[in-house]
Amino acid sequence: MGGPEGARPGDTDQLATRGPVRVVGTGLLGASVGLGLSTRGVDVVLDDPSPTALALARDVGAGRLAAEGDAPPALVVVAAPPDVTARVVAQELGAWPEAVVTDVASIKASVLAELRASGADLTRYVGSHPMAGRERSGPSAALPDLFLGRPWVIADSGTSSADAVLAVRALVVDLGGLPVTMDAAAHDAAVAVVSHVPQLAASLVAARLVDVDDAALGLAGQGLRDVTRLAASSPALWTSILAANAGEVRRVLEAVRADLDQVIAALGAAHDASGGAAVRPGALASIARAIDDGNTGVARIPGKHGGVRRDYGVVTVLVPDEPGELARLLTDVGHAGVNLEDLQLEHAARRPVGMAAISVLPGAVERLETALTERGWRLVR
Amino acid sequence: MGGPEGARPGDTDQLATRGPVRVVGTGLLGASVGLGLSTRGVDVVLDDPSPTALALARDVGAGRLAAEGDAPPALVVVAAPPDVTARVVAQELGAWPEAVVTDVASIKASVLAELRASGADLTRYVGSHPMAGRERSGPSAALPDLFLGRPWVIADSGTSSADAVLAVRALVVDLGGLPVTMDAAAHDAAVAVVSHVPQLAASLVAARLVDVDDAALGLAGQGLRDVTRLAASSPALWTSILAANAGEVRRVLEAVRADLDQVIAALGAAHDASGGAAVRPGALASIARAIDDGNTGVARIPGKHGGVRRDYGVVTVLVPDEPGELARLLTDVGHAGVNLEDLQLEHAARRPVGMAAISVLPGAVERLETALTERGWRLVR
């Protein structure tokens, strides 16, 4: 990667980002920014307090090291841990008095408040946050296309210059991101609900598995796997993110706790009543209401195509667990002329078969079912 | 479906389940039991208080209606809602004094307690619970292979006869389920942790989305979708399940609430400290501990092959959102001679490209990457 072979013909001449771009912090996000820009022909200069991370980022093609005689950067991207971001941004604003500086931290209001308190020149600062990540971290996990198709919040400082905002917007677009304009407070409130609290909920549910016996875990299904997948994330990173967005996360968690308290109280009433007496009217209503609110909430999450979630039809097929079988299935889907909108695999523990749930537009269900049956697939109707 | 065409040659002569089998309650589970047995040539007699559900179950091939001169059933499967299960089981035990009776309710201890209190003949009763379900419900969603490869708990009554246990075990095996022996109390404690609490957690997180604005929802990623997927489930069914397992669910939820309280308190400390003062030592530790415990818990969930989760290698590939592209990719995976262990699709909102994360055994990663690169796929490394 990197170098002229990595440049994509036809991309470079349309790029709006002007180099040199200085990337400070070469973890997953910083190295991916560097890799994405370098691949598209932009001159990227890397920096990181860790010589190891810096060398690794250079080696994966994220950019080059600073050299004497370098032109000053036009744009600085700070990709440091959330709790040091404001300090690094302030240093960079001071060191490069002509540069626009942005950061990619997962929280925006506390960074802005700290910068404001430091007296930094906020006309040249524009906060940002790409909604992208991976389960792996560090420069070796960097991807030039990490930001492709992902929302990328642009949060100006309130006094950012129009030119500074345009420069950051150009960065987002050049890396394939979808610019979303939002102020720092609105951003932090949004990610508390759609990212930080779900992350914590996954951890709290998974934490209950620490002490259960293996027989109980043997009953685990896909639902448990889905709910707890995020719980595999890094404690250090997430502690820092949650602490930096403490106010908003706490506000949402308190609402969760209020609902949880009601459910616990209702279960208490139901439990006391078991053994013969009728359950108190209203006790079960609050359990039903919690689940009903969940129905309403989950239905609001935008689907693949943005906006209102489409109601896909689902065709479920039994797939032998042998090399090439899933490919053969999807080839047959392709031959049916049907576009696959989503695919979920369900695993059967210790069995040589799985199920593939294929989501397609509702009008295509019957055609697909007929085509797959003709080709000998066993459908689960 | 149903009828002689539906019978699978080679299956019938190995079946251990003797008919007639009476299925009482023809929703998703009951109709799937009937369909699975009928398809394998067993005589199934259906019953349901709803004439509509009964007719629909018969029409999808789950079995036939009772007729004069029928032999009495050898086995009765009660697939009624959890809150009426014990009453129906007691009725069936009384009506058919030679039959073994089982039920498939998601909770076992309260059913057994109610039966014991009723003075029913528990030598012929064996509780059971197949860990299977779908997002759709009702007889029209029934599947003959719904139970294939799924754990199916067999919980004897403490005084069940050996013959009764064998009859229920035969049913499980004939339907492709994996028999798991567990007493009613252990079952209920296990499903509280691996199923009921995750279900509620998904609802509580999703409920927070009811009031957020569309801009915030636009930042939703795969993590939120995973955590909240279960929240689409039926309020009526889940209220009934949770109320019937109130004691165990409450116990786990109280542990969740204790962790949640600590996290909220720590966030309060972090929030109060923001603005300059240092965060109190120990405050952040409890946030880190919650996430760390989540790491430990999620690592205990058995993977596809049961037992300890393997560490798969992941190869991530960019896939154009066009018909047949995913099939072409998986065909190329098959040609590389590599077995796909798992596949996750990530969607890019409003972009004509997605990512496929292919899990394979670690030793196969390099071979697969080379093969896919040679065939022109863009890898995300």
Image (spheres, coloured by chain):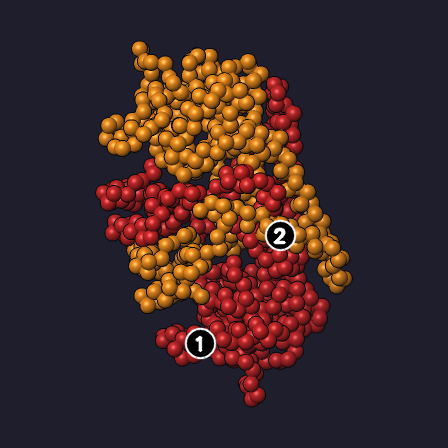
Chain colours: A red, B orange
Height in image: A135 above or below B199? below
Question: Which residue lies at the image location 46% right of the left edge and 36% below the top edge?
Answer: B151
Left or right relative to B46: residue B85: right
Q: Is mark 2 on a helix, strand or loop?
A: helix
Residue labelled with disc 2: B291
Counting other residues with Cα less than 10 Å from the Cα at mark 1, is it few (<14), some (14-19), or many (20 or more)?
A: many
Disc 2 residue type (three-letter): Ile
Height in image: A359 above or below A162? above
Counting other residues with Cα less than 10 Å from the Cα at mark 2, is it few (<14), some (14-19), or many (20 or more)?
A: many
Q: Are marks 2 and 1 on the same chain?
A: no
The quadrant in which the N terminus of chain A is found is bottom left
Q: Which mark is residue B17?
A: none
Left or right relative to A28: residue A1: left
The quadrant in which the C terminus of chain A is found is top left
Question: Which residue lies at the image location 37% right of the left edge and 32% below the top edge?
Answer: B175
Q: Nearer the viewer, residue A272 or A307?
A: A272
Alpha carbon of mark 2 to alpha carbon of mark 1: how far? 36 Å
Rendered location of residue B243, percent (x, y): 57, 29
Residue at mark 2: chain: B
Residue labelled with disc 1: A2
Q: Which residue ends up furthest to the top in the rendered image?
A: B69
Height in image: A235 above or below B35? below
Location of residue B139 (image quadrant): top left
Q: Is mark 1 on a helix, strand or loop?
A: loop
Disc 1 residue type (three-letter): Gly
Residue at mark 1: chain: A
Numbered marks: total: 2
Rendered location of residue A61, percent (x, y): 47, 75
Q: Which residue ends up furthest to the front in the rendered image?
A: B162
Residue B114 visible to the viewer: yes
Rendered location of residue B236, percent (x, y): 51, 30
Rendered location of residue B281, percent (x, y): 75, 58
